[in-house]
Image (cartoon, helix red, strand yellow):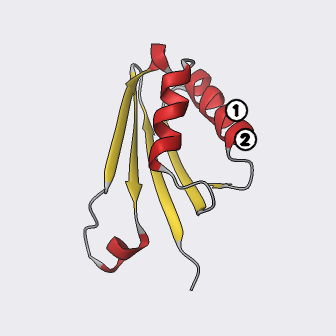
Amino acid sequence: MERILLIAVDIGNSRLKCGVFNPEGWQEKSPVASRVVSVSLSDLDRQEFADELGAVIPEKTRTVWWIASVNRPATTKLLELIRRKRSDDEIV
C-alpha cells in the first residue's frame, strides 16, 4: 500500500502552522501530528522555512496538503512554494 503523508496547514493573520501526520496515526480517532512547524508570516519568504519543511517531508513520499486560511496573500506564497518545491503533491 502506498504511503500518503498529510500536511494540515492553518494560516492565520500573523502565523502559519503545519502539522505533519504520518499514515500510521490515521487509525486513531484523534491522530496527533508527528511534527509541527510554526513560523511568523514575515518569515514565509525566507529560505529557512522552505528548508525546515523539506527536512520534515521525505522527498519521494506522496503528500497531500490540507490548507485552511484567513490570509489570502500568505496562502498564495505557500502555494507558490509548494508548486515550486513539491510539484507532484496534491493540494486540497
- Residue ID for mark 1: 80
| Quarter of the image that includes the N terminus | bottom right
Q: Residue at x 32, y 72 (%)?
A: 25
Could you tell me how far apart the alpha carbons at marks 1 and 2 are, in whole angstroms? 5 Å
Q: Are there few (<14), some (14-19), or many (20+) residues within 10 Å of tag 1?
A: few
Q: Residue at x 68, y 40 (%)?
A: 85
Does residue 12 appear in the picture of this structure?
yes
| Coordinates of residue 3 in the picture (x, y in percent) | 53, 74
Quadrant in which residue 18 is drawn: top left
- Residue ID for mark 2: 83
Does the CB distance between marks 1 and 2 fall below 8 Å? yes
Quadrant in which residue 29 is drawn: bottom left
Give the total number of marks visible in the rendering.
2
Q: Is 78 located above or below residue 90 in the figure?
A: above
Apparent side of residue 59 relative to residue 15 in the rendered image (left or right): right
Q: Amino acid at mark 2?
A: Arg
Q: Is 69 located above or below residue 71 in the figure?
A: below
SS state under label 2: helix
Q: Which mark is residue 68?
A: none
Q: Residue at x 39, y 26 (%)?
A: 39
Does residue 68 appear in the picture of this structure?
no
Q: Amino acid at mark 1?
A: Glu
Residue extending farthest to the bottom is 1
